[in-house]
Image (cartoon, rainbow, N blue to C red):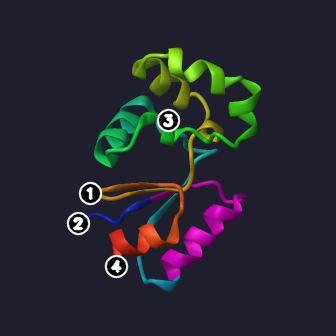
């Protein structure tokens, strides 16, 4: 099995908490800076399908870019293809951290969920 990919933004406090949790639980990951290496449309589609979550969960709804673009009112009128394309344009639009393994994708850091799904 490949090491999970930990997609994060190093300056994000939630990402720092998640990274500390991974270290504390001896879970080795490959770190990927979302600002430097934003997920592309193909990755986003795959991760979304694997996660079983609504596509909206992949948006960083509390981020400046999300608010700047007025996405709260626009997302419901956009097709999935349009949403994937938009997410692929800027890592700051994507909810983080993401933990992507061969068989699961975790979106955002909720310690209890990570505990249940990873240990």
> Which residue corresponds to the image point at 49% horizontal and 75% vertical from the top-left?
22
Mark 2 nearby-residue class (10 Å; few <14, some 14–19, many ≥20): few
> Which residue corresponds to the image point at 76% horizontal and 27% vertical from the top-left?
68
Closer to the chain start, of discs 4 and 3, is: 3
Q: Classify residue 53 by image quadrant.
A: top left
Viewer-nearest of discs 4 and 3: 3
> Which residue corresponds to the image point at 36% horizontal and 73% vertical from the top-left?
116
- Asked if disc 1 and disc 2 are in contact, CB closer than 8 Å, the reply is yes
Where residue 16 sits in the image (x, y, percent)? Answer: 64, 68
Q: Is-magenta flag for residue 20? A: yes
Where residue 29 sits in the image (x, y, percent)? Answer: 43, 68
Question: In what element is the residue under mark 1?
Answer: loop
Of residue 31 and residue 105, the one placed in the foreground of this image is 105
Question: In what element is the residue under mark 4?
Answer: loop
89 versus 54 height, above or below: above
CA gap, disc 2 and disc 4: 16 Å
Q: Disc 3 designates what residue?
A: 56
Provide the residue span drawn in magenta. 6-23
Q: Is residue 32 left or right of residue 1?
A: right
Q: Disc 2 designates what residue?
A: 1
Mark 4 nearby-residue class (10 Å; few <14, some 14–19, many ≥20): few
Q: Is residue 92 left or right of residue 97?
A: right
Count of picture labels: 4
The numbered mark at residue 111 is none
CA gap, disc 3 and disc 2: 29 Å
Closer to the chain start, of discs 3 and 1, is: 3
Q: Disc 1 designates what residue?
A: 102
Q: Disc 4 designates what residue?
A: 119
Closer to the chain start, of discs 1 and 2, is: 2
Where residue 71 sits in the image (x, y, percent)? Answer: 64, 25
Viewer-nearest of discs 1 and 4: 4
């Amino acid at each position: 099995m490949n090491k999970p990919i930990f997609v994060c933004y190093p300056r994000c406090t939630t990402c720092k908490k998640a990274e500390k949790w991974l270290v504390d639980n001896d879970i080795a990951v490959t770190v990927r800076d979302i600002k430097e290496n934003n997920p592309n449309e193909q990755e986003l589609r795959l991760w979304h399908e694997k996660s079983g979550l609504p596509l909206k969960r992949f948006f960083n709804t509390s981020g400046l870019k999300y608010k700047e673009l007025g996405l709260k009112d626009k997302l419901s009128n956009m097709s999935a293809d349009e949403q994937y394309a938009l997410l692929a344009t800027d890592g700051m639009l994507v909810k983080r951290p993401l933990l992507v393994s061969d068989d699961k994708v975790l979106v955002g850091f909720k310690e209890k969920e990570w505990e249940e799904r990873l240990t």
